[in-house]
Image: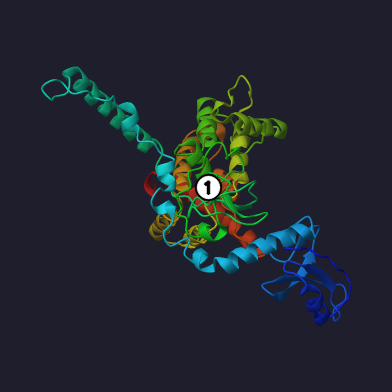
Amino acid sequence: YLFCLYHGMISREETDQLLSVAEGSYLIRESQRQPGTYTLALRFGNQTRNFRLFYDGKHFVGEKRFESIHDLVTDGLITLYIETKAAEYISKMTINPIYEHVGYTTLNREPALKKALPVCRDMPDGKDSPEETGLEERLTSLVRRATLKESERAPKYEKVHNFKVHTFRGPHWCEYCANFMWGLIAQGVKCADCGLNVHKQCSKMVPNDCKPDLKHVKKVYSCDLTTLVKAHNTKRPMVVDMCIREIEARGLKSEGLYRISGFSDLIEDVKLAFDRDGEKADISGNVYEDINVITGALKLYFRDLPIPVITYDAYPRFIEAAKLTDPDERLEALHEALKQLPPAHCETLRYLMAHLKRVTQNEKDNLMNAENLGIVFGPTLMRAPDLDAMTALNDIRYQRQVLELLIKNEDILF
């Protein structure tokens, strides 16, 4: 392909005549009817194609942004060539993908049994050695127990992939259909949580089986709750477990627990410690004597979640439940609303409510009852999804009531 560049206010006819000299030639012309707007004219397939050209610091005609017009045209010619010459092939790419045969799950899992068991040699009479048979049985039992413990500890939460447009350096192949990713930049998408690389069109076909990897999940705070528990292979975020253990060990009788704020600088230190060290973060009394720093760090974790513990999707169900006047109907509605939460969210909420109930059992010392805790945790665990200011303001009292009911009826609802 040849690349020729012209500027000026010329007609379509003149443009077509100029570009007819060679395939791949292009020019940018200013509109005669709308001065200040520009068109990229490109010669491909023995015809001139016109694209409205935009600039916002980078040049673009579609989704992709380019530093230079030359790069934009190069990428466009590659895309046009592939889509023209291989249209039928592209349309069939997702019909029989390698993903269905090899699978993301298969690629990321080694059978524990194969790794744990020794290779048994045959005895002269064709039977296994008694010692080896006994060892195999013991190892099998151990593996089964370990697997059982693991399944109890970390339920299999379904998670969608967190795909982001990505520019791959050098040749790259889609991990869904095993076909080449074409283009100069932004050739496909990459899951920010597990690193899966696929075509944009293939991303719509990938199952919700993301297995977040700690190589990609670099932080604890502001990380999606389900992503965090899957990355660390736990039931709940370690922040919640560790903070609650620390609070119950030395703070249940502390006056104004969760209502009194700790120093913001120290709370930020705890956040940075979790982001840097994960479950190895030291939040003991030796480092943070004031228990309000730990409660502040826990509340900050919940506030920083991109999707609240009580998710945006489930939020209306909880608010409607709180508005019911009949106590039995209200509890039944709350129970149904809890079913709308993703497993990791529901488990985290259950664990927190059990803890807050233990806080209320020490009300004589800490002066914190379910109503007080509802006021503190309502806006922290529930955030209105794009409601107008007046509606959101009216919802505050129902948020408090939801949390109060969850604390008081924790043993029934969960």
113 above or below 411? above
Residue with the most extreme top position: 131
In the picture, measured across the screen, residue 151 lies left or right of residue 301, that is left
Percent coordinates x, y for residue 72 in the rendering: 74, 60
Q: Is residue 63 visible?
A: no
In the picture, measured across the screen, residue 275 lies left or right of residue 10, that is left
Residue pictured at 40% horizontal, 57% vertical = 336
Asked where in the image residue 124 lies, by quadrant, the reply is: top left
64 above or below 129? below
Residue with the most extreme front position: 21
Percent coordinates x, y for residue 190 in the rendering: 58, 49
Determine the secondary structure under disc 1. loop
124 above or below 357? above
The tally of labels here is 1
> Please, what is the three-letter code of the amino acid marked with disc 1?
Leu
Residue pictured at 50% horizontal, 29% vertical = 245
- Binning the other alpha carbons within 10 Å of mark 1 as few (below 14), some (14 to 19) or many (20 upward) gives many
Asked where in the image residue 337 lies, by quadrant, the reply is: bottom left
Q: Which residue is mark 1?
A: 196
In the picture, which quadrant includes the N terminus?
bottom right
Percent coordinates x, y for residue 110 in the rendering: 38, 36
